Image (cartoon, coloured by chain):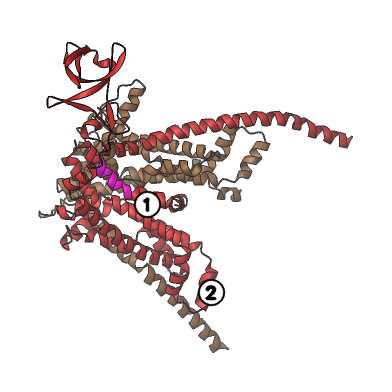
Amino acid sequence: MATRDIVIAQRTPAASSSRRKMGLRLTRVTGLILSLAILTAGSVIILMPLVWMLSTSLKTDTSATVFPPQWIPQDPRQAVIDGKKYYLYDIAVDGQMRQLALLRKESGKGIFVDPADPSVTYALDTNSGKRVQDVVLHWENYPATFTKVPFLKYLSNTMIIVVTTTIGVLISCILVAYGFSRFRARWLDVFFLILLSTIMLPPQVTLIPQFVIFQKMGWYDTYLPLIVPAFFANAWDVFLLRQFFMSIPLELDEAATIDGAGPLGVLLYIIIPQAWPAVATVAIFHFLYAWNDFFYPLIYIQSKDKWTVALGLQSFNALYARNYSSMMAAATVTMLPCLLLFFFAQKLFIQGIVVSGIKG
Amino acid sequence: MATATTAKKRKLVSLSKREARWAYFLIGPWIVGFLIFTFGPMIASLLFSFTDYAVAKPTHWLGLKNFAEMFLGDYRFWWSLRVTLFYAIFSIPIGLAVGLLLALLLNTKVPGITLWRTAYYTPSVVSGVAVAVLWAQVFNPRFGIINWLLSLLHIKGPGWLADPKTALWALIIMSLWGVGGGMIIYLAGLQGIPTALYEAAEIDGATSTQCFFSITLPLITPVLFYNLVTGIIGTFQIFTSVYVMTAGGPGEATLFYNLYLYNNAFRYGRMGYASAMAWILLLIVMALTLLVFRSSAAWVYYEGELRKR
């Protein structure tokens, strides 16, 4: 009796489960297709502005403002008749497609001629034809942008700030994170709590006195207010590095100590080599921050020859707002280093966001 | 015997002293920086907030006058607060929902996860003036691609940044461009949920909707919580996009709190008043964060609770 019961109990669910499995597989396939469809639509929309920016940067200002927008930069083809330029149209004449130039419009009709034989005119409906377009990439927009404003100067100014502050952030944050992760001392926990709480502190609260101090020190219109604070560590990067340092086994430190390494030796030969992904992540995120920073250069830097890319781009925007293609060329150049960095160091990016995000 | 133990103790004491000395030597740069760049300026700005401090002019003690003016006489203060909160109320929840939805889709074992992740995260690596300049063109009412997309749906697009009614909405839409950052954090959270929980639920015959509401959502709440708090703090820092794209306009439609604070400090030279605004901002952020923290007991689920039970 007992064995039969078991057999029955096993058989019934098995029979219905195979049917259920079929159903599940079907819903899974439709679910997958639906997911892919949504993801594709979403990524097309999200990448559209970037593609449009690149495309506009290679257009003339006239074709940049065409509606509906052209995704591939095109210029209308023109024909010269008697020293004057006219747009060419693909248009049907008596059922035959021909390429004609539009001379003028007269009472709703377009007056067209064949550029090869301008003596014969045709009155046709303009809407039945299509302008002839040639794909032309206006790469010259880029050098033109560089000559309108000293963009290369701004780039090198920005690089000076980015490189020095990255060095400052790395040195100071590594030392401080090492102190917080590997040593015991009274009040150290209190200091760590204070450090963490500064993450929540809105920078506006310290902004004005900082500005006044730097001004009184004669640092206004120099890079010092932007560079010097980087050498005194910041809560965000210290936290990220400390979390990583904590995960390195203490046995490694001890082995190095037995081999005669001091605290700095342990940092140099054990911690930093072990933690290099975290160190690289900090460097990358600081690079992005310093490269794109607008607020602090805006309030501290006045002289045009000291401007950063962000300041230069803003003034370019104010001066040449209608030079649509040049604007997009300038924006493309500004974004390019960040995009390249991302594509070449994706793993570090993802890791950095996850570490700083999840455990924060 | 006795002398040996004291010697041993002394050596221990000196060892722990040496360790402490190293600790303070290493964190020294931060302590010095904290005192000079954070603590000192905080006290100073608190003092400034009770004065009419302006770099070039003599300073007078005003007592609470700045705060009285702000609350009773300055409609722009209330307006900028309204603009900022309106933006936060829409951009933060929509951003949370879209980011979570994308992460859920990516977590269903779709092929090419790295590719999707790259596509959605790319906009998050660019920021600042370049992005503002780009989006100003994206929202161009004549030839911008937003109105082009709307025209495909046979909708006549509004004037966006040129229209006081839609300018703030344009900035809210633009904020969604950065959902990739939140998405990656959610994805990591989702991948951290033990699959055993889902297997157990499947054996119990739970539907996927049930799984979502009783496993996924509760376990992802700490991450939602984190993104909510950082989102609130971030909204009060918005500056570059507004400064470049609208300068607070048209009219005062996008006069964000931070922009109005900047205007007071660096355009009108009212540094005392701006300091008072900064301290009110600190109180607002603290109050909101506290509110979220307090309420979190009701809706945020920490795995540690499992062990407590």
The residue positioned 44% from the left and 54% from the top of the image is: A348
Q: Nearer the viewer, residue A144 or B251?
A: A144
Task: Compute the Cα span from label 2 to label 1.
Answer: 36 Å
Q: Which residue is mark 2?
A: A255
Q: Residue furthest right?
A: A1
Q: Is residue A52 magenta?
A: no
| Camera-nearest label, 2 or 1 | 1
Q: Which mark, by number, is residue B265? A: none
The crowding category of the residue bearing disc 2, from other C-alpha atoms within 10 Å (few below 14, some 14 to 19, many at least 20), is few
The amino acid sitting under disc 2 is Ala
Secondary structure of the residue carrying tag 2 is helix
Work out whether residue A261 can be spotted: yes
Q: Which residue is mark 1?
A: A341
Residue A78 image point, x, y percent:
21, 27
Q: Nearer the viewer, residue A145 or A198?
A: A145
The number of discs equals 2
**Magenta segment:** A328-336
Q: Nearer the viewer, residue A230 or B31?
A: A230
Q: Is residue A334 magenta?
A: yes
Residue A76 image point, x, y percent:
24, 28
Secondary structure of the residue carrying tag 1 is helix
Q: According to the colouring, which chain is brown?
A: B
The residue positioned 46% from the left and 40% from the top of the image is: B116
Q: Left of B293 or right of it: where is A71?
A: left
Residue under mark 1: which chain is it in? A
